[in-house]
Image (spheres, rainbow, N blue to C red):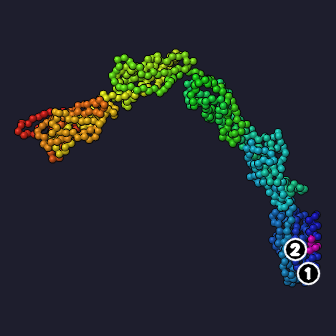
Amino acid sequence: MGPRIFLIISTALLLAVNYAEGKWSYPDQRISEGPLNEKMKVVKIHSKDNSTATYDISGDFGTKFEIDRKTGQIWQVEAVDRETKDRYTITIESADSNGNPTEDPFLFDIVVADINDNYPEFEESSLTGSVEELHDKGPDSTPFMQVKATDADIGFNAAIRFSIEEGRDIPESPSGNRFIIDPVSGWVRVNGDDLNYEFNPVVRFIVIAVDSNGGAGSNARSREVVVSVRDSNDHAPEFGPLADISLSELSGLYTPLYIMYASDIDEGVNKKVYFEILNGNTGGPFTIVSQQSEIDKNLGELQLVKPLDFESGVVSYELKIKAYNKDASNAADVTYASESTLSITVIDANEPPIFRDTPYNYRITEGPAPAQPVPIIQVHAEDIDFNKTQTVTYSLEDPENWFDIVATTGQITLKGAVDREATADGVYHLKVIATDNYDHGHPASGSEEVAITIEDINDNPPAPDWGPEGATTYVCEKPRNRTARHIKATDPDSAVNGPPFTFRLHDSVDQTKWSLETVDDESVNLIAEFSDYGLSSNVSLIFTVADSGTVSKTGTATLTATICKCGDDGECTNHYAFPYTRGPQPFTSHGPTIECTTLWRAEIFIFPIIYTHFSI
């Protein structure tokens, strides 16, 4: 009744104003939306012109309004809905009995006033959310989702307040509602401690939205909200049983020695368990390699990264081991880690004897075998297994059989002739082996090298290095190239007993025809001093080579020079190769180019043909 009384009073005032002012003018009119049981007066228009006989209205109102054409009363005849259309523009007109206008047309609006006739509507996408099971809790915690709703009304009628229905959580929570909601913003926070992904991965609650701020005449609507609970690392791994173990001190490195297990009922990275040794790993010989095996199990392989040593005195370990989720966001929280202890006993094993006072080095001078064995150096190996109750015997690996060893004491003696030149670098590497007398299996052996430096004596003369040409050369009877052959010498002795070498032709060599020309410390050239040697076959050129040792050594060698007739190109032409060659093979002044059996033919001067057979 209130809105209707307001409209009647406003109409009366309008008419009073209109008549008082005596002009054709009307303000906007207000009507209320909602059901209409009978037609209602809106406003009565009146023209000051006494000739006015009829009134009319037009506009975008359809059939919702009508006018009494004689009295000018405008009526609302149909219900209006503000949410559909909130105002209507009315054009009013007046005319005399002949239809002539008595006033200019005038426009005013009929404004539809809102009533609370709509319910809140939820945004569907805001009714689903997700939260980690370890999300922070309480009224000051971080909201994880926002419920949203709208109301088609306006102003106070559209002011929405949210709440959560008590005791309607699904599944029911013994601690009360799991969530709280901000009544104005709709932000949802975790309230209780009953989020558990492993048992309830999805929870539901009822949210209520009420308009008009929940006041009198408000409209309310409720919906179910679905929250997916995400897994958090809220469970500590659980160890499988750990058994005490014994390990030989000879256990291999980086191989599985013991397998431990742990399980975790969380999911994803929160399920994967890693193992870590916290303490008890004296000297750091152990590590644990973490691996996943089955769906619900994680395993850790106990491995050695350093060898065990019973004799060091550390014969047992108490490893305190942590199982935790290294990749979880709260990996550092000890609440979600487990600890257990693994007991390890180290067992003594038969190991090779250990050589002491290494490295072993000695120097001797090469020479003939001594009349009696000569002690040179003593080695010592110790067996510390089983309280040092075992004995050690010694043996040698001596390829040249120059030395011997006393099996019980490790004394090495020189017994044979030593030749420095038999070694690669003047150092002889002697291998000494120490073996224990373990009688419960195979004895163990260890070895050590004795490096014996052999000092040189000048016991080798230099000798020519003839190379593939051998100790022969070919020289034209009328040489164009005076260098008949390059001769290089070598000496197996050390540098102090080696070059520079001294080369000399023997007195038997005709030194008017032959000479030696120094090239460097190790070589000379044979020079042909003649211009026409004349007819000859082979010439033996004997020469000596002496080294530079304090007590010099001299070697003697013979080079056979074959004098041949040569063509214009300076190559020998008076010999032929058969039957193993493809034809005549020329020879250079530095020797033949192939190895074969050749038949030499002397040129006929005043002598009959003579055939001489040589083997090259």
Of the numbered discs in the image, which one, if any, rests on residue 27?
2
Between 244 and 515, which is closer to the camera in this rendering?
515
Quarter-wise, where is residue 54 in the image? bottom right
Q: Residue at x 28, y 30 (%)?
A: 552
Looking at numbered disc 2 in the image, what kind of residue is underneath it? Answer: Pro
Quarter-wise, where is residue 38 in the image? bottom right
Say whether disc 2 or disc 1 marks the residue closer to the N-terminus. Answer: 1
Q: How dense is the environment of label 2, judged by Cα within 10 Å: few (below 14), some, or many (20 and up)?
A: few
Q: Which residue is mark 1?
A: 22
Q: Which residues are magenta?
A: 10-14
From what the image shows, is residue 408 above or below residue 267? above
**Percent coordinates x, y for residue 361 in the rendering:** 44, 27
Judging from the image, what secondary structure is the residue with disc 1 in? loop
Looking at numbered disc 1 in the image, what kind of residue is underneath it? Answer: Gly
Q: Residue at x 70, y 41 (%)?
A: 330
Q: Is residue 300 left or right of residue 406?
A: right
Q: Residue furthest front?
A: 550
**Percent coordinates x, y for residue 48 in the rendering:** 91, 81
Q: Residue at x 40, y 26 (%)?
A: 363
